[in-house]
Image (spheres, helix red, strand yellow):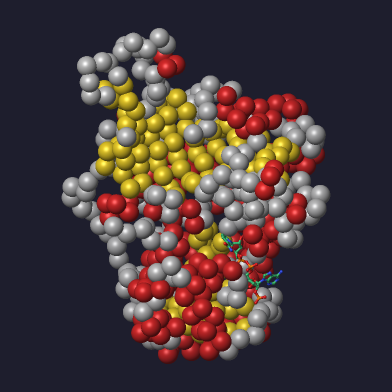
């Protein structure tokens, strides 16, 4: 049974447009730029949130004229709005494309950066922009160091007095391939850029509903007193994808689920769910609390403790579903995947947090590809009532209250409660108080990239990773990757049929805390 929430009163709303600037997009011929970045910038344009003096300068090796680049961007925007073609208003689109230009060059060629620098100056002049520049590295991560170095050598990352005009650099995840490469990149960034110039992008943090977790926790007095080991039994965080690796098999086979999802998105969702209240909603305060939380995560048992790790972290790979129940092939038969690949496409893990608030409360995390359906959510299961009335024979029969923060799809919040069913008998039902963004606000939340690009242009780093967070996350993940590589037989790679909810070993992990996956 479902009871709906209604909007009582819109309260605080702080949305400002960005500062005048130009965005230089590296890897402009690539997948991310066409599927996400350009449609997101167009989305901001439609909402009149782009600066009035603004331009986009694409940079990549592919040879293209400005006109050809605009043609590609037109196609990208049209494809992104295929379901709502009315959003592609021709006049608006033409005005947007008029701000797009392109320059080609090799990422390691100093002369390319001279050309880029001249093109930036021309754009600054033509668009009457202020010289503020945002360099967005939508490139495979092994190119991040060389581009950062070349940008600095060409003085493109120099800022003016008091940081005006500014120069900022956005790094797409993953931030390194392991702890050593992340530290290496960080030391290069430390030598070439000030911390205020660095934006480490993890688009999960820009999702409206991820941010709403913070607002839910810290703008409502009724939940925070319950948000601890006394009242919470366990927390489940799920990010499930129904698709396989699609066209990204080459990248994914090198990365795997633990690197691709846990090192970043999953740990960030855990951090915002479990962190202490920050002193303010300023970037440094929020990031400090996330770091503190990540540093409190208990390391998983690796090395000398032998097979103990399997009781904490389960890994698995999808295979074809029997009887053609799913159209996906086995992971090993996906394009660009090695036929003997041992890359995990699914991970479930038990995480404990060693601090006062969360001592002994398991956080159960799972993520995978080719699962039953696409869903991302944080489900907080409260402890059961201490004493059972109403004719139930044991406490275990009394359902617990569950608060579900739904990140996608159907973004919203559900809270289950027990209530009396009308009638002369003492019958009880579980009801869901259910709040859906779409029902209340009438719109689907804007894409995460819109929010994050706006933040970059405004210099707000609250929703970006700090160096300390990257290191803390890798410090947790790295030993597991090493353990799997050094002792593959200790923690076996399980399999699961595409279209299922994952391997049985993950269910057993959940049973070990006396619970079931939702
Ligand atoms: P692509 O593989 O599409 O690469 C982007 C561009 O980089 C290509 O168009 C190509 O441009 C250039 N490039 C690619 N490989 C090389 C190479 N080996 N040497 C030199 N240039 C190369 O990447 P994506 O757009 O998919 O991703 C970019 C970044 O964003 C990555 O860090 C990725 O992890 C991250 N990301 C991507 C997501 C996605 O959905 N695609 C989601 C989240 C993050 P050209 O040849 O013209 O120079």
Q: Quadrant of residue 425?
A: top left
Which x, y percent locates residue 406? 41, 44
Quadrant housing the N terminus = top left
Q: Is residue 331 left or right of residue 164?
A: right
Along the viewing direction, whichever of 102 and 435 lies nearer the viewer: 435
Q: Quadrant of residue 357?
A: top left
Against 463, residue 432 (above or below) is above
Which x, y percent locates residue 390? 31, 13
Does residue 359 appear in this view? yes
Which x, y percent locates residue 310? 69, 30
Along the viewing direction, whichever of 290 and 316 lies nearer the viewer: 316
Q: Residue furthest front?
A: 323
Q: Is residue 9 left or right of residue 485?
A: left
Does residue 356 appear in this view? no
Q: Is residue 264 left or right of residue 400?
A: right
Which x, y percent locates residue 258? 64, 45
Question: What residue is at 71 percent from the left and 39 percent from the top?
Answer: 495
- Please tell me how many numbered marks the rendered image carries: 0
Question: What residue is at 80 percent from the left and 34 percent from the top?
Answer: 489
Against 188, residue 224 (above or below) is above
Question: What residue is at 78 percent from the left and 42 percent from the top?
Answer: 485
Along the viewing direction, whichever of 387 and 20 lies nearer the viewer: 387
Q: Residue furthest left?
A: 9
């Amino acid at each position: 049974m479902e009871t709906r929430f209604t909007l009582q009163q819109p309260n605080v709303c702080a949305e400002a447009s960005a500062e005048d600037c130009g965005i230089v997009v590296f890897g402009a011929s690539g997948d991310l730029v066409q599927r996400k970045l350009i449609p997101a910038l167009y989305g901001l344009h439609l909402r009149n949130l782009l600066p009035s003096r603004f331009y986009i300068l694409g940079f990549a090796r592919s040879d293209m004229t400005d006109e050809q680049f605009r043609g590609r961007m037109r196609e990208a925007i049209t494809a992104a709005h295929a379901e709502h073609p009315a959003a592609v208003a021709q006049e608006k689109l033409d005005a947007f494309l008029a701000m797009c230009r392109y320059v080609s060059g090799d990422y390691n060629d100093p002369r390319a950066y001279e050309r880029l620098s001249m093109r930036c100056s021309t754009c600054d002049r033509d668009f009457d922009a202020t010289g503020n520049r945002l360099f967005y590295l939508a490139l495979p991560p092994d190119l991040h160091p060389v581009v950062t170095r070349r940008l600095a050598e060409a003085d493109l990352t120099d800022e003016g007095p008091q940081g005006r005009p500014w120069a900022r650099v956005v790094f797409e995840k993953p931030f390194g391939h392991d702890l050593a490469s992340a530290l290496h990149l960080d030391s290069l960034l430390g030598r070439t850029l000030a911390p205020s110039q660095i934006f480490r992008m993890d688009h999960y943090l820009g999702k409206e509903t991820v941010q709403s977790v913070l607002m839910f926790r810290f703008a409502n007095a009724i939940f925070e007193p319950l948000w601890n080991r006394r009242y919470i039994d366990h927390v489940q965080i799920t990010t499930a994808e129904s698709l396989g690796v699609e066209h990204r098999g080459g990248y994914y086979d090198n990365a795997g689920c633990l690197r691709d999802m846990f090192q970043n998105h999953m740990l960030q969702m855990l951090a915002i769910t479990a962190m202490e209240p920050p002193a303010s909603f300023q970037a440094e305060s929020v990031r400090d609390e996330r770091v503190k939380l990540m540093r409190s995560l208990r390391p998983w048992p690796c090395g000398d403790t032998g097979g103990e790790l399997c009781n904490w972290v389960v890994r698995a790979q999808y295979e074809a579903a029997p009887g053609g129940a799913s159209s996906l092939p086995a992971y090993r038969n996906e394009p660009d995947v090695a036929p003997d690949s041992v890359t995990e496409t699914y991970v479930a893990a038990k995480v404990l947090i060693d601090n006062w608030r969360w001592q002994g409360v398991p956080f159960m995390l799972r993520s995978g590809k080719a699962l039953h359906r696409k869903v991302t959510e944080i489900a907080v299961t409260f402890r059961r009532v201490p004493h059972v009335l109403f004719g139930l024979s044991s406490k275990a029969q009394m359902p617990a209250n569950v608060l579900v923060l739904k990140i996608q799809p159907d973004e919203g919040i559900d809270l289950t409660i027990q209530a009396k069913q009308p009638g002369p008998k003492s019958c009880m039902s579980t009801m869901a108080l259910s709040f859906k963004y779409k029902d209340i606000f009438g719109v689907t939340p804007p894409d995460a990239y819109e929010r994050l690009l706006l933040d970059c242009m405004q210099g707000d780093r609250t929703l970006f990773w700090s160096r300390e967070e990257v290191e803390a996350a890798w410090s947790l993940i790295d030993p597991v990757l090493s353990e799997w590589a050094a002792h593959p037989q200790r923690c076996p790679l399980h399999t699961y049929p595409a279209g299922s909810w994952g391997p049985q070993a993950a269910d057993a992990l959940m049973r070990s805390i006396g619970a079931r996956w939702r």
